[in-house]
Image (cartoon, rainbow, N blue to C red):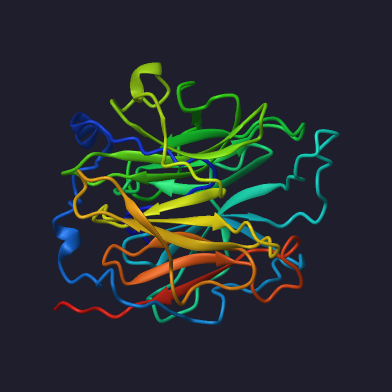
Amino acid sequence: MSSRIRRGAVVGTIVAVPLCAACATILGFDNYSSESAGAGRCSADGAFVLNPQPLFDNQVDGIVNADRRGVYLSEDENQIYFGMDTVPEKIDSGTDGGSTLLNWKLYVATRGSRDQKFGTPQGIPGLNQFYSQRHPTFANDGRMILFSGQESDKNDNHTLFYATRDGDAGAFRPPQQLSDRINERGYNLDPFLYTPSDAGKELWYVHIDDASRSETLRHARILNDDLTASGSFEEPAVFNPTPNVETTPVLSADGLELYFSREETDASGNANIWRMRRATTADTFAGREKVEGVNSDFFDRPGWLSPDGCRLYLLSSRGTNSITDGALNIYVAERPKTSP
């Protein structure tokens, strides 16, 4: 089944990288516009209502509480891509006090229509060749995927990779690292590609500094189609830093809403989904606000917003036994459509 792809998601410092006009011809970014995204959209002022049932069982291949990171869907929402850990053993993080890492792989699951359940997740051919890979995000034509990968089990830094294919289905070519301008030493996580054909193309991601362990959201312009070249990106900029750790950026199709996960500074230790808005894509995002109707007392992270702005796919550890050990499952929340 071939389903065209629209948008994606990320963690850490968020970086936005607009793509050049020439990239549309080479990589097929020319079949979606921010103007068409406005037709029949749900109002950004509408309230989300969460379906309390997760999209997948917590147990996969005999592993209880299979954990998931990153969510991306095809335009028709009948293909879903995500990173998932199904290995029960954790890797010792060493003596630096860092968090334990798991063995993540990239999966895809399909369904016949939006009112059906997804089938059994399958590994994405050609991409699961590293020790760990997670947080997939696509260019809007489905021909290019970005993800965060860890090449070995030695707890080395996470790096952003991309891979291409000839159409919106089929096998990907071998992954390549993004340029060093993006992949600074440390952890580079949670990539999100915003690739409309008629507006600035952007890459957003999270960066964790190797020395200080500070996390920041970053964004940078994409200047040409060869993402391995040093001149492919403008210098990344830190996005609107705050004392709170903010990760997993997700943009709406019209580029006017930015969703992200924000760790609370109180004793709860949880993270909730927040957003910022802007009037036009030329404006700056402003006005942080917690998203109503989707958050819990555990970890909640945005994953992907449908092109019409009606459905937010999110990851949450609700329904598990603890905040720190609870695995993230995928949920969907919907808000009413107010225009024909």
Q: At x 51% / y 42%, what residue is drawn?
A: 147
Q: Indicate the quadrant where residue 171 lies.
A: top left
Q: Quadrant of residue 223?
A: top left
Residue 70 in view in this figure: no
Residue sitting at x 69%, y 67%: 60
Viewer-proximal residue among 44 and 184 = 44
| Vertical side of 129 occupied by 86: above or below | below
| Left or right, residue 24 beside residue 142 | left
Q: Position of residue 138 (x, y in %)?
A: 39, 47
Query: Residue 77 location, x and y as percent?
Result: 37, 67
Left or right: residue 31 versus residue 149 is left
Q: Quadrant of the N terminus?
A: bottom left
Instruction: State how many labels appear.
Output: 0
Q: Where residue 257 sits: x, y (%)?
A: 31, 57
- Residue 125 position in % (x across, y down): 53, 46
In this rendering, does residue 229 appear at all? yes
Vertical position of residue 214 compared to residue 310: above or below = above
| 333 relative to 226 in the view: left or right | right
Examine the rendered structure and indicate whether residue 174 appears above or below residue 258: above
Q: Is residue 93 above or below residue 68?
A: above
Q: Quadrant of the C terminus?
A: bottom left
Tell me which corner region of the image, top left, top right, bottom left or bottom right, holds residue 65. bottom right
In the shown orientation, is residue 273 left or right of residue 237? Answer: right
